[in-house]
Amino acid sequence: MPFYTRLGEVPHKRHTQFRKADGSLYAEEVMGLEGFHGIQSLLYHHFLPPAVLRSELLGPAKPTYVDFGAIRHRALQTVDMPAGGDAVAARRVLLGNNDVTLGISRPTSSMTYFYRNAQAYEVWFVHEGKGTFRSQFGKMPFEAGDYIVIPYGTTWQLLLHSAECRFFVIESNSQIAPPKRYRNEYGQLLENSPYSERDLRPPQELETIVEQGEFEVRIKVRDSITRHILSHHPFDVVGWDGYLYPWIFNIRDFEPITGRVPQPPPVHQTFEGMNFVVCSFVPRLFDYHPLSIPAPYNHSNVNSDEVIYYCDGNFMSRKGIDRYDITLHPFGLPHGPQPGMTEASIGATKTEELAVMVDTFHPLHLTTDALEIEKTEYQASWLA
Ligand SMILES: [Fe+2]
Protein backbone atom coordinates (compact mmCIF):
# COMPACT_ATOMS: atom_id res chain seq x y z
CA MET A 1 0.00 0.00 0.00
CA PRO A 2 1.11 3.55 -0.58
CA PHE A 3 1.67 4.52 3.04
CA TYR A 4 3.36 3.24 6.17
CA THR A 5 1.00 1.72 8.73
CA ARG A 6 1.53 0.22 12.19
CA LEU A 7 -0.83 -1.74 14.40
CA GLY A 8 -0.27 -3.33 17.82
CA GLU A 9 3.08 -3.70 19.59
CA VAL A 10 6.40 -3.66 17.75
CA PRO A 11 9.93 -3.26 19.19
CA HIS A 12 11.69 0.07 18.75
CA LYS A 13 14.42 -1.43 16.56
CA ARG A 14 13.69 -4.02 13.87
CA HIS A 15 15.37 -7.44 14.06
CA THR A 16 16.15 -7.12 17.79
CA GLN A 17 14.95 -9.00 20.89
CA PHE A 18 11.22 -8.57 21.45
CA ARG A 19 9.93 -10.57 24.41
CA LYS A 20 6.56 -11.72 25.70
CA ALA A 21 5.49 -11.21 29.34
CA ASP A 22 6.92 -14.67 30.19
CA GLY A 23 10.34 -13.66 28.87
CA SER A 24 10.29 -15.78 25.68
CA LEU A 25 10.83 -14.25 22.26
CA TYR A 26 8.15 -13.30 19.76
CA ALA A 27 8.79 -14.77 16.28
CA GLU A 28 9.61 -12.02 13.79
CA GLU A 29 8.53 -12.48 10.16
CA VAL A 30 9.41 -10.27 7.19
CA MET A 31 6.73 -10.45 4.51
CA GLY A 32 8.02 -8.74 1.37
CA LEU A 33 7.24 -8.68 -2.33
CA GLU A 34 9.72 -9.03 -5.20
CA GLY A 35 12.52 -10.59 -3.18
CA PHE A 36 12.41 -7.92 -0.42
CA HIS A 37 12.71 -5.18 -3.05
CA GLY A 38 9.02 -4.34 -3.11
CA ILE A 39 6.66 -3.28 -0.36
CA GLN A 40 6.98 -5.24 2.88
CA SER A 41 5.84 -5.55 6.48
CA LEU A 42 7.35 -6.93 9.68
CA LEU A 43 5.06 -9.11 11.81
CA TYR A 44 5.58 -10.40 15.37
CA HIS A 45 3.99 -13.81 16.08
CA HIS A 46 3.30 -15.71 19.30
CA PHE A 47 4.03 -18.99 17.51
CA LEU A 48 6.51 -20.06 14.84
CA PRO A 49 4.96 -19.19 11.43
CA PRO A 50 6.24 -22.35 9.64
CA ALA A 51 4.76 -24.78 12.23
CA VAL A 52 2.53 -27.08 10.14
CA LEU A 53 1.12 -30.37 11.47
CA ARG A 54 0.00 -31.84 8.13
CA SER A 55 -0.20 -30.88 4.47
CA GLU A 56 -2.35 -32.34 1.72
CA LEU A 57 -2.82 -31.50 -1.98
CA LEU A 58 -6.50 -30.77 -2.66
CA GLY A 59 -6.28 -30.43 -6.44
CA PRO A 60 -5.83 -28.07 -9.38
CA ALA A 61 -7.18 -24.51 -9.28
CA LYS A 62 -6.60 -23.29 -12.82
CA PRO A 63 -9.61 -22.13 -14.84
CA THR A 64 -10.21 -23.87 -18.16
CA TYR A 65 -11.26 -21.74 -21.10
CA VAL A 66 -13.37 -22.46 -24.16
CA ASP A 67 -12.74 -21.48 -27.78
CA PHE A 68 -13.89 -17.87 -28.27
CA GLY A 69 -15.23 -18.42 -31.79
CA ALA A 70 -15.94 -15.52 -34.15
CA ILE A 71 -14.99 -12.17 -32.63
CA ARG A 72 -18.11 -10.46 -31.28
CA HIS A 73 -19.40 -8.43 -28.34
CA ARG A 74 -20.68 -10.60 -25.52
CA ALA A 75 -22.91 -10.06 -22.51
CA LEU A 76 -23.26 -12.30 -19.48
CA GLN A 77 -26.27 -12.34 -17.15
CA THR A 78 -24.95 -13.07 -13.65
CA VAL A 79 -28.13 -12.30 -11.67
CA ASP A 80 -29.10 -15.97 -11.23
CA MET A 81 -25.65 -17.48 -10.88
CA PRO A 82 -25.72 -20.17 -8.18
CA ALA A 83 -25.42 -18.91 -4.61
CA GLY A 84 -24.21 -20.96 -1.66
CA GLY A 85 -21.22 -21.94 0.40
CA ASP A 86 -18.46 -19.63 1.57
CA ALA A 87 -16.90 -16.79 -0.43
CA VAL A 88 -13.95 -18.77 -1.79
CA ALA A 89 -15.99 -21.89 -2.61
CA ALA A 90 -18.73 -19.85 -4.30
CA ARG A 91 -16.35 -18.06 -6.68
CA ARG A 92 -16.94 -18.77 -10.39
CA VAL A 93 -14.36 -17.49 -12.88
CA LEU A 94 -16.06 -16.19 -16.04
CA LEU A 95 -13.25 -14.49 -17.95
CA GLY A 96 -9.48 -14.58 -17.79
CA ASN A 97 -6.05 -14.59 -19.38
CA ASN A 98 -2.47 -14.98 -18.15
CA ASP A 99 -2.63 -11.65 -16.28
CA VAL A 100 -6.01 -11.59 -14.58
CA THR A 101 -9.25 -13.52 -13.99
CA LEU A 102 -12.71 -12.05 -13.39
CA GLY A 103 -15.58 -13.80 -11.67
CA ILE A 104 -18.59 -13.67 -9.39
CA SER A 105 -19.03 -15.05 -5.88
CA ARG A 106 -22.41 -15.30 -4.11
CA PRO A 107 -21.67 -16.82 -0.69
CA THR A 108 -24.38 -17.55 1.85
CA SER A 109 -22.11 -18.61 4.72
CA SER A 110 -18.96 -17.50 6.51
CA MET A 111 -15.66 -19.29 5.93
CA THR A 112 -14.78 -21.94 8.52
CA TYR A 113 -11.17 -22.24 7.30
CA PHE A 114 -8.50 -19.70 6.36
CA TYR A 115 -7.34 -18.93 2.82
CA ARG A 116 -4.04 -17.70 1.41
CA ASN A 117 -3.48 -16.93 -2.25
CA ALA A 118 0.29 -16.98 -2.63
CA GLN A 119 0.28 -16.57 -6.42
CA ALA A 120 -2.10 -13.65 -6.94
CA TYR A 121 -3.41 -10.36 -5.66
CA GLU A 122 -7.16 -10.40 -5.20
CA VAL A 123 -9.73 -7.61 -5.24
CA TRP A 124 -13.18 -8.45 -3.90
CA PHE A 125 -15.65 -5.78 -4.99
CA VAL A 126 -18.64 -5.92 -2.66
CA HIS A 127 -21.74 -5.35 -4.76
CA GLU A 128 -24.19 -6.44 -2.06
CA GLY A 129 -24.02 -7.55 1.56
CA LYS A 130 -21.77 -6.86 4.49
CA GLY A 131 -19.41 -8.66 6.81
CA THR A 132 -15.94 -8.77 8.30
CA PHE A 133 -12.67 -9.41 6.51
CA ARG A 134 -10.18 -10.98 8.95
CA SER A 135 -6.44 -11.45 8.42
CA GLN A 136 -3.20 -11.64 10.36
CA PHE A 137 -3.02 -7.84 9.89
CA GLY A 138 -6.30 -7.28 11.74
CA LYS A 139 -9.96 -7.12 10.84
CA MET A 140 -11.93 -4.74 8.65
CA PRO A 141 -15.71 -4.40 8.38
CA PHE A 142 -16.90 -4.30 4.75
CA GLU A 143 -20.08 -3.11 3.07
CA ALA A 144 -21.54 -2.55 -0.39
CA GLY A 145 -19.24 -0.57 -2.69
CA ASP A 146 -16.02 -1.64 -1.00
CA TYR A 147 -13.05 -2.84 -3.00
CA ILE A 148 -11.18 -5.21 -0.63
CA VAL A 149 -7.58 -5.35 -1.90
CA ILE A 150 -5.67 -8.43 -0.68
CA PRO A 151 -1.90 -8.77 -1.30
CA TYR A 152 -0.18 -12.05 -2.15
CA GLY A 153 0.41 -14.26 0.87
CA THR A 154 -2.19 -12.71 3.17
CA THR A 155 -3.97 -15.35 5.28
CA TRP A 156 -7.60 -14.34 5.49
CA GLN A 157 -11.14 -15.32 6.29
CA LEU A 158 -14.40 -13.72 5.26
CA LEU A 159 -17.38 -13.63 7.64
CA LEU A 160 -20.86 -12.69 6.44
CA HIS A 161 -23.13 -10.38 8.43
CA SER A 162 -25.95 -10.58 5.89
CA ALA A 163 -27.84 -13.61 4.57
CA GLU A 164 -25.93 -13.35 1.31
CA CYS A 165 -23.17 -11.33 -0.30
CA ARG A 166 -22.48 -10.71 -3.96
CA PHE A 167 -18.91 -10.01 -5.09
CA PHE A 168 -17.22 -9.21 -8.39
CA VAL A 169 -13.79 -10.79 -7.95
CA ILE A 170 -10.55 -9.81 -9.68
CA GLU A 171 -7.54 -12.10 -9.33
CA SER A 172 -4.24 -10.82 -10.66
CA ASN A 173 -0.81 -12.35 -11.09
CA SER A 174 0.66 -8.89 -10.45
CA GLN A 175 0.37 -6.35 -7.67
CA ILE A 176 -2.74 -4.13 -7.70
CA ALA A 177 -2.15 -0.54 -6.60
CA PRO A 178 -3.25 3.05 -7.16
CA PRO A 179 -1.94 4.22 -10.57
CA LYS A 180 1.57 5.70 -10.51
CA ARG A 181 0.34 8.84 -12.27
CA TYR A 182 -1.82 9.61 -9.20
CA ARG A 183 1.24 9.66 -6.91
CA ASN A 184 4.25 11.90 -6.45
CA GLU A 185 7.83 10.62 -6.22
CA TYR A 186 7.30 9.91 -2.51
CA GLY A 187 4.19 7.81 -3.15
CA GLN A 188 1.75 10.38 -1.80
CA LEU A 189 -1.49 10.73 -3.75
CA LEU A 190 -1.56 13.97 -5.76
CA GLU A 191 -4.09 16.78 -5.45
CA ASN A 192 -5.60 15.82 -8.82
CA SER A 193 -5.99 12.15 -7.87
CA PRO A 194 -9.69 11.13 -7.68
CA TYR A 195 -9.11 9.87 -4.13
CA SER A 196 -6.74 10.52 -1.25
CA GLU A 197 -5.14 8.55 1.57
CA ARG A 198 -8.13 9.38 3.81
CA ASP A 199 -10.29 7.27 1.52
CA LEU A 200 -8.09 4.17 1.91
CA ARG A 201 -8.90 2.04 4.96
CA PRO A 202 -6.12 -0.17 6.39
CA PRO A 203 -6.93 -2.71 9.15
CA GLN A 204 -7.94 -0.79 12.28
CA GLU A 205 -8.24 -3.55 14.86
CA LEU A 206 -5.72 -6.32 15.44
CA GLU A 207 -6.94 -9.77 16.50
CA THR A 208 -4.28 -11.52 18.56
CA ILE A 209 -5.49 -15.06 19.15
CA VAL A 210 -3.06 -17.09 21.29
CA GLU A 211 -4.55 -20.51 20.76
CA GLN A 212 -3.05 -23.90 19.96
CA GLY A 213 -4.89 -26.77 18.28
CA GLU A 214 -5.62 -27.57 14.63
CA PHE A 215 -6.36 -24.75 12.18
CA GLU A 216 -6.94 -25.27 8.46
CA VAL A 217 -5.38 -22.93 5.90
CA ARG A 218 -6.04 -23.53 2.17
CA ILE A 219 -3.15 -22.20 0.13
CA LYS A 220 -3.38 -21.39 -3.56
CA VAL A 221 0.00 -21.59 -5.25
CA ARG A 222 1.40 -23.27 -8.41
CA ASP A 223 -2.21 -23.30 -9.73
CA SER A 224 -3.20 -25.83 -7.06
CA ILE A 225 -4.79 -25.77 -3.62
CA THR A 226 -2.89 -27.26 -0.67
CA ARG A 227 -4.45 -27.78 2.74
CA HIS A 228 -2.21 -27.03 5.71
CA ILE A 229 -3.18 -27.85 9.27
CA LEU A 230 -1.37 -25.39 11.53
CA SER A 231 -0.64 -26.16 15.17
CA HIS A 232 -1.73 -22.66 16.17
CA HIS A 233 -4.22 -19.98 15.18
CA PRO A 234 -2.92 -18.05 12.14
CA PHE A 235 -3.95 -14.72 13.68
CA ASP A 236 -1.36 -14.81 16.47
CA VAL A 237 0.26 -11.47 15.60
CA VAL A 238 0.89 -9.04 18.47
CA GLY A 239 1.96 -6.21 16.16
CA TRP A 240 3.13 -5.34 12.65
CA ASP A 241 4.28 -2.38 10.61
CA GLY A 242 5.12 -1.62 7.01
CA TYR A 243 3.55 -1.03 3.63
CA LEU A 244 2.19 -4.53 2.89
CA TYR A 245 -1.33 -5.21 4.20
CA PRO A 246 -4.89 -5.59 2.92
CA TRP A 247 -6.93 -2.43 2.58
CA ILE A 248 -10.33 -1.18 1.47
CA PHE A 249 -11.47 1.62 -0.82
CA ASN A 250 -15.17 2.34 -1.33
CA ILE A 251 -16.25 3.12 -4.91
CA ARG A 252 -18.45 5.97 -3.62
CA ASP A 253 -15.30 7.71 -2.39
CA PHE A 254 -14.10 7.96 -6.01
CA GLU A 255 -14.46 11.61 -7.05
CA PRO A 256 -15.49 11.74 -10.72
CA ILE A 257 -13.59 13.99 -13.13
CA THR A 258 -15.92 15.72 -15.59
CA GLY A 259 -15.63 18.47 -18.20
CA ARG A 260 -17.40 20.58 -20.81
CA VAL A 261 -16.98 17.73 -23.33
CA PRO A 262 -16.55 14.00 -22.60
CA GLN A 263 -13.40 13.10 -20.67
CA PRO A 264 -11.45 10.07 -21.92
CA PRO A 265 -11.99 6.71 -20.16
CA PRO A 266 -8.70 6.89 -18.13
CA VAL A 267 -10.31 9.55 -15.85
CA HIS A 268 -12.23 6.65 -14.31
CA GLN A 269 -9.10 4.65 -13.50
CA THR A 270 -8.98 3.42 -9.91
CA PHE A 271 -6.22 0.76 -9.76
CA GLU A 272 -3.53 -0.60 -12.02
CA GLY A 273 -2.03 -4.06 -12.39
CA MET A 274 0.33 -5.57 -14.95
CA ASN A 275 -1.46 -5.46 -18.34
CA PHE A 276 -4.83 -4.33 -16.97
CA VAL A 277 -6.57 -1.44 -15.23
CA VAL A 278 -9.61 -1.21 -12.96
CA CYS A 279 -11.97 1.76 -13.41
CA SER A 280 -14.99 3.02 -11.48
CA PHE A 281 -18.04 4.61 -13.09
CA VAL A 282 -19.80 6.56 -10.37
CA PRO A 283 -22.79 8.94 -10.16
CA ARG A 284 -21.72 12.22 -11.75
CA LEU A 285 -22.79 15.31 -13.68
CA PHE A 286 -22.63 15.08 -17.46
CA ASP A 287 -20.64 17.42 -19.72
CA TYR A 288 -21.74 21.06 -19.70
CA HIS A 289 -20.90 22.33 -23.20
CA PRO A 290 -24.15 23.84 -24.64
CA LEU A 291 -24.07 21.27 -27.47
CA SER A 292 -22.81 18.38 -25.34
CA ILE A 293 -23.72 14.75 -26.01
CA PRO A 294 -23.88 12.78 -22.72
CA ALA A 295 -23.76 9.33 -24.37
CA PRO A 296 -20.21 8.13 -25.05
CA TYR A 297 -18.77 8.25 -28.58
CA ASN A 298 -18.09 5.08 -30.55
CA HIS A 299 -14.68 3.76 -29.72
CA SER A 300 -12.24 1.15 -30.92
CA ASN A 301 -10.27 0.04 -27.90
CA VAL A 302 -7.65 -1.34 -30.25
CA ASN A 303 -5.29 -2.90 -27.72
CA SER A 304 -7.60 -3.76 -24.88
CA ASP A 305 -10.55 -5.96 -24.07
CA GLU A 306 -13.13 -4.02 -22.06
CA VAL A 307 -15.21 -5.66 -19.34
CA ILE A 308 -17.94 -3.80 -17.46
CA TYR A 309 -19.84 -5.11 -14.44
CA TYR A 310 -23.08 -3.13 -14.08
CA CYS A 311 -23.93 -2.50 -10.42
CA ASP A 312 -26.57 0.18 -10.05
CA GLY A 313 -28.36 3.00 -11.84
CA ASN A 314 -29.51 3.31 -15.42
CA PHE A 315 -26.92 2.48 -18.07
CA MET A 316 -28.16 4.84 -20.71
CA SER A 317 -25.68 3.91 -23.41
CA ARG A 318 -26.41 0.17 -23.21
CA LYS A 319 -29.69 -1.27 -24.50
CA GLY A 320 -30.70 -4.67 -23.12
CA ILE A 321 -28.24 -4.53 -20.25
CA ASP A 322 -29.49 -5.06 -16.71
CA ARG A 323 -28.09 -4.82 -13.20
CA TYR A 324 -25.59 -7.66 -12.49
CA ASP A 325 -24.77 -8.09 -16.21
CA ILE A 326 -21.21 -8.18 -17.50
CA THR A 327 -20.30 -7.03 -21.01
CA LEU A 328 -17.14 -7.92 -22.89
CA HIS A 329 -16.21 -5.60 -25.76
CA PRO A 330 -13.16 -7.32 -27.22
CA PHE A 331 -10.63 -5.56 -29.37
CA GLY A 332 -11.01 -6.13 -33.08
CA LEU A 333 -14.29 -4.30 -33.52
CA PRO A 334 -15.66 -0.91 -32.40
CA HIS A 335 -18.52 -0.37 -29.99
CA GLY A 336 -20.68 2.52 -28.82
CA PRO A 337 -24.27 3.48 -28.04
CA GLN A 338 -26.98 1.41 -29.71
CA PRO A 339 -29.30 2.99 -32.34
CA GLY A 340 -31.15 6.04 -31.00
CA MET A 341 -29.31 6.15 -27.69
CA THR A 342 -27.05 9.07 -28.62
CA GLU A 343 -29.94 11.37 -29.63
CA ALA A 344 -31.97 10.20 -26.61
CA SER A 345 -29.17 11.16 -24.23
CA ILE A 346 -29.12 14.84 -25.20
CA GLY A 347 -30.41 17.07 -22.42
CA ALA A 348 -29.55 14.68 -19.58
CA THR A 349 -27.59 16.48 -16.87
CA LYS A 350 -26.45 13.65 -14.60
CA THR A 351 -26.22 9.89 -14.21
CA GLU A 352 -26.67 7.63 -11.19
CA GLU A 353 -24.82 4.74 -12.84
CA LEU A 354 -22.41 2.64 -10.81
CA ALA A 355 -20.18 0.15 -12.60
CA VAL A 356 -16.75 -1.45 -12.39
CA MET A 357 -14.70 -1.72 -15.56
CA VAL A 358 -11.60 -3.83 -16.17
CA ASP A 359 -9.59 -3.21 -19.34
CA THR A 360 -7.05 -5.91 -20.19
CA PHE A 361 -4.23 -5.40 -22.66
CA HIS A 362 -4.31 -9.03 -23.83
CA PRO A 363 -7.41 -10.92 -25.02
CA LEU A 364 -9.71 -12.49 -22.46
CA HIS A 365 -11.03 -16.04 -22.71
CA LEU A 366 -14.39 -17.33 -21.50
CA THR A 367 -15.12 -20.30 -19.23
CA THR A 368 -18.02 -22.74 -19.63
CA ASP A 369 -19.67 -20.98 -16.66
CA ALA A 370 -19.70 -17.81 -18.81
CA LEU A 371 -21.22 -19.55 -21.84
CA GLU A 372 -24.10 -20.83 -19.72
CA ILE A 373 -25.20 -17.30 -18.82
CA GLU A 374 -24.51 -15.55 -22.14
CA LYS A 375 -27.11 -13.19 -23.63
CA THR A 376 -26.54 -14.35 -27.18
CA GLU A 377 -28.67 -11.57 -28.68
CA TYR A 378 -26.26 -8.83 -27.49
CA GLN A 379 -24.25 -8.40 -30.72
CA ALA A 380 -27.50 -7.81 -32.64
CA SER A 381 -28.46 -4.89 -30.35
CA TRP A 382 -26.56 -2.46 -32.63
CA LEU A 383 -28.82 -3.22 -35.62
CA ALA A 384 -31.48 -0.59 -36.26
FE1 LIG B 1 -16.37 1.07 -24.09
Image (tube, rainbow, N blue to C red):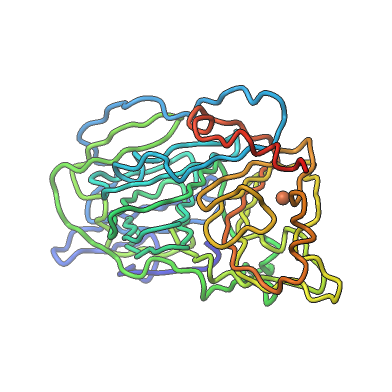
Q: Nearer the viewer, residue 334 or 36?
A: 334
Left or right: 210, with 264 as reference point: left
- Looking at the picture, does residue 197 appear above or below residue 208? below
Q: Residue furthest front?
A: 384
Image coords of residue 114 (percent x, y): 29, 45
Q: Quadrant of residue 296?
A: bottom right
Q: How many marks?
A: 0
Q: Position of residue 280 (x, y in %)?
A: 60, 60
- In the rendered image of this protein, does residue 374 appear above or below residue 134? above
- Residue drawn 42% across and 40% down? 81
Residue 215: quadrant of the picture: top left
Answer left or right for 164 relative to 347: left
What is the quadrant of the C terminus in the image?
top right
Instruction: Say if 283 sits above or below 270 in the image.
Output: below
Q: Nearer the viewer, residue 184 or 258?
A: 258
Q: Position of residue 77 (x, y in %)?
A: 52, 42
178 relative to 295 in the view: left or right: left
Report the side of 5 relative to 334 (left or right).
left
Q: Position of residue 344 (x, y in %)?
A: 75, 62
User: Which residue is at a point 52% across and 53% down the rendered structure image?
Assistant: 323
Tell me which residue sits at (43%, 58%) in the image: 246
Q: Nearer the viewer, residue 52 or 95?
A: 95
